[in-house]
Amino acid sequence: MERDGETPKPLRERPRVPGYLTFEWRAFHVLLSDRAPGIHGAIPFSSLDRYAARFGLDDPEAFERFHALMSAMNATFSEVLASRAPPPAT
């Protein structure tokens, strides 16, 4: 995705995901398909629970961390969508 030998800005500035967060990063991208539509949509708890169970995340404290991280990632995703939305018509 280079133009004239230059890497596009979004690729240059994308965050690096630490290796220990690979599971969560992949989970978020998979679970986005279950997210309610709209700027403030959420990933259903049942989807998070089922995904965690599928991959053997059965410790309650580990699931709470997973749930908190998915919620934080979704909130950030919502903020980005909101920042890109056209202003309301007046």
Image: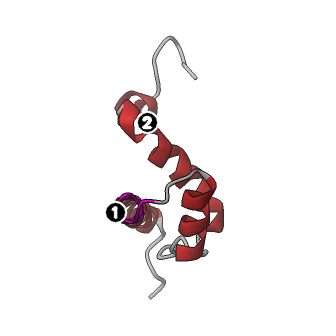
Q: Is residue 38 visible?
A: no
**Residue 6 in the image: above or below residue 71:** above
Estimate the spatial distance between the alpha carbons at disc 2 and disc 1, rounded to whole Å. 35 Å
Foreground: 59 or 76? 59
The amino acid on which the numbered mark 1 sits, given as a three-letter code, is Glu
Specify few, some or many for label 1: CA neighbours under 10 Å numbering under 14, 14-19, or 20 or more: few
* Magenta portion: prevailing SS class: helix
Residue at position x 54%, y 51% in the image: 27
Residue at position x 60%, y 69% in the image: 47
Foreground: 41 or 6? 41
Foreground: 25 or 56? 56
Rendering coords of residue 5 (x, y %): 50, 11
Residue at position x 63%, y 56% in the image: 54
Residue at position x 43%, y 36% in the image: 10
Q: Quadrant of residue 82?
A: bottom left
Q: Earlier in the sequence, mark 2 or mark 1?
A: 2
Q: Which residues are magenta?
A: 59-67
Q: Is residue 6 visible?
A: yes
In the rendered structure, find residue 61 and report the number of the disc placed on it. Answer: 1
Q: Secondary structure at mark 1?
A: helix
Discs 2, 1 touching: Cβ within 8 Å = no
The residue at the far top in this view is: 5
The amino acid on which the numbered mark 2 sits, given as a three-letter code, is Pro
In the rendered structure, find residue 10 and report the number of the disc placed on it. Answer: 2
**Residue 12 in the image: above or below residue 32:** above
Rendering coords of residue 87 (x, y %): 43, 75
Image depth: mark 2 or mark 1 in front? 1
Does the stretch in magenta take in 22? Answer: no
Q: Quadrant of residue 31?
A: bottom right
Quadrant of image for the N terminus: top right
In the rendered structure, find residue 79 and report the number of the disc placed on it. Answer: none
Rendering coords of residue 25 (x, y %): 47, 45
